[in-house]
Amino acid sequence: MNGKSTSTRTKLERGRSALGPALELVHTGRAPTRAVLTSELGVTRATAGAVAAELEALGLIKVDSSPGSAAGSQGRPSHRLSVRDSGPVALAAQVHSDGFRAALVGLGGRIVATAPGCVAVMADPAQVLGEVVEAGAQLLRESGLRCVGAGLAVPSAVAEPEGTALNPLHIAWPAGAPVREIFSACVRAAGIPGPAFTANDVNLAALAEHRHGAGRGAQHLLCVATGHRGVGGALVLDGRLHSGSSGLALEVGHLTVNPEGRPCHCGGRGCLDVETDPLAFLTAARREPGPEESLLKQSGDLLRSEYGDSDVRAAAEELIDRLGLGLAGLVNILNPDRIILGGLHRDLLQADPERLRAVVADRSLWGRSGSVPILSCTLDHNSLVGAAEMAWQPVLDDPLAALT
């Protein structure tokens, strides 16, 4: 009897220890069926079935026990696994130079609801974060869904472990603002359950793209993207963000790509941040930015709709060459197996992919480094999805502890 009890307890513990890895496999789309889950976890079919059943009981996934065979398939079809549409959500918030946005994001990176906020960011971070959290709280009240936590994306390097915004260059916040502390206080004041997290917006975009978008499957993923203003970068290694010793790694916006170029907010000159962002493109194309729409939208619309115009094409080629120079330097140092580009950089890649790839290849030290794939980011609102990933991480690590 004791031997049986020990065996049963061992199987139960093994199954429970697999809950987090199993949920992550379904969350990232790598286990669409119970058969794949069994293989990926390296457990028996019975254990995989028990794990899937427990995740279903927690309201996180859906197990379809009668999916029907696909045309031409043989044998009994495996149960299909998917995230639960009516399951819990994370509150995600993003602040950028043209305003803020709140969203509810479920497992699988699925945006359930969004609430665009103000179009001007005030100089007081507490006021802005209070407003964006209230917008998210209203979404939660309207949805009636359970919340697992909250995440915030900001256009600044975020120092660890303090959670301070060191260089919010394109918004009027003071350097060193304690954004994580303020955000956490706003989340608690709004009665939103779960932990609260804060990180740099491009870091979070890279994390989201690695799990759900163009970076899926990469082992060493480099992401470079414009925001509404400025340029950021991030590196994901084996599924984890590489943030350096204090959260400040991959400040690629301050790589010099034009020594005689524009003065940068950092004190340097000719940085990616001011040579390849939306304002730089509009200026090079001899277009006066208007107040009605964000610089990011204006630059993207201009590039897509007027690429045949000589000024627009010349501006695009100038930015592509400078971006390529910066990417080549990063490739030589980091040796990524994939590069993904976001914001205006995605549009520049799509406008002339061969030119950008040729510049990177020409400036790379090794032939293999020069042929690294360069792809466009594919997720809408990837910084928001990445902010939600932070809030989902404790659940992915240990669903039982996080939810019960």
Image: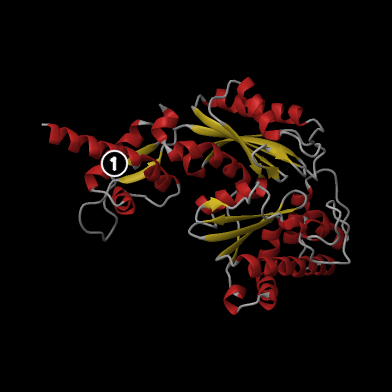
Left or right: where 386 falls relative to 174:
left
- As drawn, the residue found furthest toward the left would be 1
Quadrant position of the N terminus in the picture: top left
Name the one closer to the observer, 298 or 88.
88
**Residue depicted at x 25% and y 51%:** 77
Q: Is residue 38 visible?
A: yes
In this orientation, which residue lies closer to the viewer: 76 or 304?
76
Q: Position of residue 243 (x, y in %)?
A: 62, 50
Q: Quadrant of the C terminus?
A: top left
Q: In x, y percent, where is residue 169?
A: 80, 45
Observer-nearest residue: 166 or 132?
166
- Give the image's coloring scheme: secondary structure
Q: Nearer the viewer, residue 310 or 356?
A: 356
Question: Which residue is rendered at x = 70% and y = 26% of the image?
Answer: 130
Q: Disc count in the image?
A: 1
Asked if 58 appears above or below 78 in the picture, the reply is above
Please, what secondary structure does the residue beneath circle 1 have?
A: helix
Q: Position of residue 128 (x, y in %)?
A: 74, 30
289 over 399 or under it: above or below: below
The answer to whether any part of residue 66 appears in the image is: no
Residue receiving disc 1: 14
- Density class for disc 1 (Cα within 10 Å; few <14, some 14-19, many ≥20) is some
What amino acid is at disc 1? Arg
Give percent across and percent down for residue 274.
Answer: 82, 57
Q: Is residue 68 left or right of residue 306?
A: left
Q: Residue at x 75, y 48 (%)?
A: 228
Quarter occupied by residue 262: bottom right
